[in-house]
Image (spheres, rainbow, N blue to C red):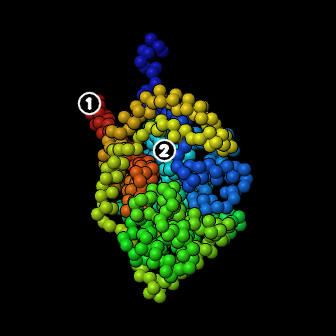
Amino acid sequence: MGAHAPTEGRRLPLRSTAPAIAWGLALFASVVSVVLRQAVPFTVGGGAVDDKLYLRTATYLAEGAWLGPFDQYTLVKGPAYPAFIAAMYRAGIPLQTGEQLTHLVAAAAVALCVWTVLRRQVVALAAYVVLALDPTNFDTWASRATRDTWYASLTMLLLALVFLAVYAAVSRARLRWIVAYSLLAGVAGGAFVLCREEPMWIAPALCVVVVGLPVAVMLRWWFRKPRARPEARASLVAAARPLLAVGVILGLAFASSVAVSDENQHQYGAAVTSDLVYGSFGRMYADWRRVDGGVSSPADPITSAQRQAVYEVSPSARQLEPFLDPEGGCKSPTDAGFGFGSGIAPCRFPVWRGIRAAATDLGYFETGADAQRFFGQLDAEIESGCASGQLRCSPRLPTSMQSLQLFQLHPFAAFMRTWTWRTALSSGYFDLPPGHRSRIGTVELRATLDRILRGVPTTVPQAAARDAAFGTRTWPYRLLFSVYRPLLPALLLASVVGMCLPIVRPRWPQAALSVLSLAFGLGALTRIAFVALLTITAFRTGGLEVRYLLPAHTLLLAFAVVGTCQLVDAISARIAKRRGRASSTDAVAEAVMT
């Protein structure tokens, strides 16, 4: 009988089967997320400087023609997202599938952070599942060839890889792991810098990781009793490892920007990654906005009074006057754009586009060098007018900060309150792609999509049929939306507790994960703050706040997930400790009885 124990005795314990179940759920979530993303119909939105520009640029990249022939739009946007589109096309992968795979890699990187610190496989896999099924990857912005959804995933990936690199350095991992994580983080950093033209908003979150982890290690040593005196050589090696990781990351990110600038210089004569934000146009636009003349605002960035004042002192600006402010006013609503009849915007609204269009008509966009010279001369004339007193001007700030002269605390605080709350509740983030025919695109546009996109209908009837089919199978998306709306606030509450526990009662390495949680949370807040500044000082977002805030929502979900993992770990450790005490008590009692 002893050789044939009861069936219950041969069952695998739950603890041994849990990892297998978790791996199965992670694999299932990965497949489901890719299938759901593939089913989202490809829609067309934006004008010449949005979706169509990305596709145009990606087509030239895929064909080996760099960014294509030069015009006023060629260098408006960073090339990272078009390069990604081209890479997916050359690899034979549909764009939306490629974007979802990027998100899954980012989710896996966060899960790896959790496992590396806590060594709890099931908890890490649960974190991956929650992040993998993030519904923002299936909403209306995910249906377009626009960089925002991919950028949100890239942001989460960058922070997670930087954490892995620096944590490997401070925890004295093998050098090959430090270098490997640093190289991956550097590549992600280069893509991040070249994707959008505002990379500095992520700097506070990155600083939390780069500075916070070494500080946590120092505090661990400081509070250790007894505290051993470190050797000088060991201290130098310990300090050199994080510096090596950060150096590799910054070096790769910087090198990628330099490489793109050099290629643009070679191809077009403009050594910039974006000639809208950087170079002479960005500086000229910022200086024109600081000229005294009416109340400049996002709705009216360069007022009529500011334009007239600069026309008086700048021969270059006077060349633009017939296009921006012709005698008799704008000839048609098409010329005036959204500003027609309002008395606010100049002809060819918005004003930045109007200036560039006028320069194009004047022949100053034949090459990048021509554009840089013209706008550089215009800026020099504005600066001369400010210096001589012919123009009254506010103080000159760095180009990216000049719009801060319009900062107002009340609207900034109102935006922060509204959108922090809305982001935490996912209000407005989970909207299905629009079903109206205007998003299907024209016959001509659809016919060109097969040059750069895989698996996308190339005729209007095919696109309409796919859109109609999607409309009959939206229940999985709506189910996810209904689950994640209450899930995120609940996880946020748990994450705050989980993040604080290793800090209030210092525990290592759990405190390292608190650094990552803090970085994710701070990143979400700084993104909201950046979009707030953009909205109240630079240009009207026009109801596109959710689009620009997608990174904030993604980082907030990552914060919620990582902090909750910390809380689960703390509870599990407490339970295990109590069980250990109970086992010890039982052993003592048994010894006494015997």
Residue at the extreme top: 1
| Residue 457: image tag | none
- Relative side of 306 to 439, left or right: left
Image height of 475 relative to 301, above or below: above
Which quadrant would the C terminus be assigned to in this image?
top left
Image height of 584 relative to 348, above or below: above
Image height of 95 relative to 366, above or below: above
Which mark is in front, 2 or 1? Answer: 2
- Residue 102 visible to an observer of this rendering: no
- Relative side of 561 to 64, left or right: left
- Front residue of 437/540: it is 437
Badge 2: residue crowd in 10 Å (few <14, some 14–19, many ≥20)? many
Q: Which residue is drawn at the image coordinates 48% and 15% (left, top)? A: 3
Q: Which residue is drawn at the image coordinates 36% and 48% (left, top)? A: 423
Q: Which residue is drawn at the image coordinates 64% and 53% (left, top)? A: 57
Badge 1: residue crowd in 10 Å (few <14, some 14–19, many ≥20)? few
Label 2 element class: helix
- Front residue of 511/454: it is 454
**First-in-chain label (2 vs 1):** 2
Residue at the extreme front: 328
Q: Which residue is drawn at the image coordinates 49% and 69% (left, top)? A: 327
Q: Amino acid at mark 1?
A: Met
Residue designated by label 2: 141
Residue designated by label 1: 593
Label 1 element class: helix
Residue at the extreme right: 64
Q: Amino acid at mark 2?
A: Trp
Which quadrant would the N terminus be assigned to in this image?
top left
Give how far across and how far down residue 576 sits, in percent.
35, 39
Give how far across and how far down residue 88 sits, in percent.
64, 44
- Front residue of 416/281: it is 281
Q: Give the Cα separation between the discs numbered 2 and 1.
A: 70 Å
